[in-house]
Image: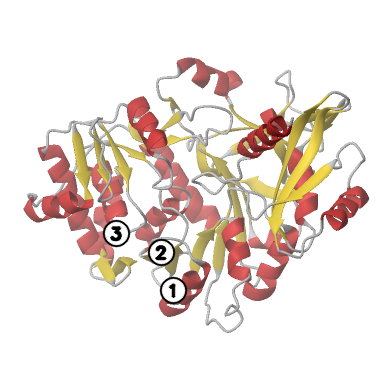
Amino acid sequence: MQIGSIIRRSALQFKDAPCLSEGSRTVSFRQFDELTDRLGNALRDLGLEQGDRVAVVLPNGIECLVAYYAIAKAGLVRVSLNTRETPDDHLYKLTDSGSRAVVCADGLRFPELEFSIDESMVAQLLCSARTGVCAFDRGLDEPLRLGYTGGTTGRPKAVTLTTRGELAELLSFLSDLVPDLSASDVFLHASPIAHASGAFFLPAVVRGAHSVVLKKFDPAEFLDLAARTQATMSFLVPTMLAMILEQPGLERADLRFRRIAYGASPIAPSILQRAEDRFGRIFAQTYGQAESPMVITYLAPDHHDRIGSCGRPFSCVEVAILNESGAFVPPGEVGEVVCRGPQLMAYYWNRPEATAEAFRGGWLHTGDIGRMDEDGFFYLLDRKNDMLISGGYNVYPREVEEVLLEFEGVTEAAVVGLPDEKWGDRVHAVVAGRESLSTPELLEHARQRLAHFKCPKHIEIWPELPKSSANKILRRSIKERLIARKDKEN
């Protein structure tokens, strides 16, 4: 099945019902199908050929999603770039992917590429493009789009995602994460479409739900738009949810949410409890990574009493824990999280050695350290490469961060290891949250909850922690900043 076929089928089924809204504009399912056909035809008429990579650097909005699915219909390969990234980030990914064209926001220029199409040009192309169905078939295992890893341990790698994987992700969402999504729902896209929120658009199209896009996240605007559109579903990262909970108008807002998915980083138990007190038990966590986008495990709303768990595997995914020798470990023991299933990437783009390493033994090695309990629920301890060794003991930063996040008023936490002659890695924590936070109280809280070798030797309070374009806290950046400050002091 082709992705374009899904768009056409929904246009026939839901016709003039609202498909996608942003600001004062709305397009129906029929119009979305026509717009993606026209832009797809225009891209092919420029001379782009089957399999050519086309990057998209657009903010949240109608044009962004039209470009995404026009590229899919035209048999081209989408390379999604985040507008929050730097020009150097963009140039690296455009070069690495071998992109031939880019669809970008007005004001951006990419002279290195053969075709640079800004939003004004998109409007012109839509007006002049030939009508008619744009349908170029590709094999289920041929590249559909390239997504980039977070680059937390080095240069980001492009993961090659296929139509087979896209369909597996779609079915996983519809069977597990949002099984009751229907034409009566309004999905509010508040986080970047280039990241996780965009993954919810195709399920909404299949079920006839109305997607409403917030161009840029603002907690007050989120609440206002949610009330005005009577939004029933959304996806948020924990930092966004924490900001929403601090809004003075939250209690008075007329909200109708019945499912909010979250992911990308751990959530503070205190934040989750406050959110459930206000919204009800409607939160579902999803765990995935670029190599298995959004789909490894999920924690259903009724399972949120399992503190710290990232849930059970999605229906089409097999997940296990392996030790250093590659052997399965029994429940309760710690090892690397591995998975396999149709949702996985095909390979890293132009990186055969990295691909072989990631898929050794026939499983995708996630690089995450975790364990499974007797009921099949998984718990993440940390990234394999982020583990610290302090005084000869293994310390998982995430475990320490989760304890700090328990403290009222802490909304973000990061733990890093700083070089130390005595300890090897000196456990150092940085947190953000309410202005009233006290370092001595935080340290006392940590001492009561953690073994002495896991307890931070020092805790700093920052206004906010540096994050990636996908809203993931950048431990490496924090560590580099702390070391640079120490070197300057010396």
**Looking at numbered disc 3 in the image, what kind of residue is underneath it?**
Ile
**Looking at numbered disc 1 in the image, what kind of residue is underneath it?**
Leu
Q: Quadrant of residue 405?
A: bottom right
> What x and y, as percent, mark residue 81?
38, 41
Residue 175 disc label:
none
Cα distance, mark 2 to mark 1? 8 Å
CB under 8 Å between discs 2 and 1: yes
Task: Name the residue furthest bottom.
Answer: 252
Q: Which residue is mark 3?
A: 62
- Give the answer, above or below, for where 350 lies relative to 31: above
Q: Quadrant of residue 274?
A: bottom right
Quadrant where the N terminus is found in the figure: top left
State the residue in front, 385 or 258. 385
Q: Which residue is mark 2?
A: 214
Pointer 2: residues within 10 angstroms few (<14), some, or many (20+)? Answer: many
- Give the answer, above or below, for where 457 lies relative to 432: above
Tell me what residue is drawn at x 78 percent, y 43 percent. Answer: 399
Q: Earlier in the sequence, mark 1 or mark 3?
A: 3
State the residue in front, 137 or 396. 396
Q: Is residue 228 left or right of residue 371?
A: left
Cα distance, mark 3 to mark 2? 10 Å
Q: Which residue is mark 1?
A: 225
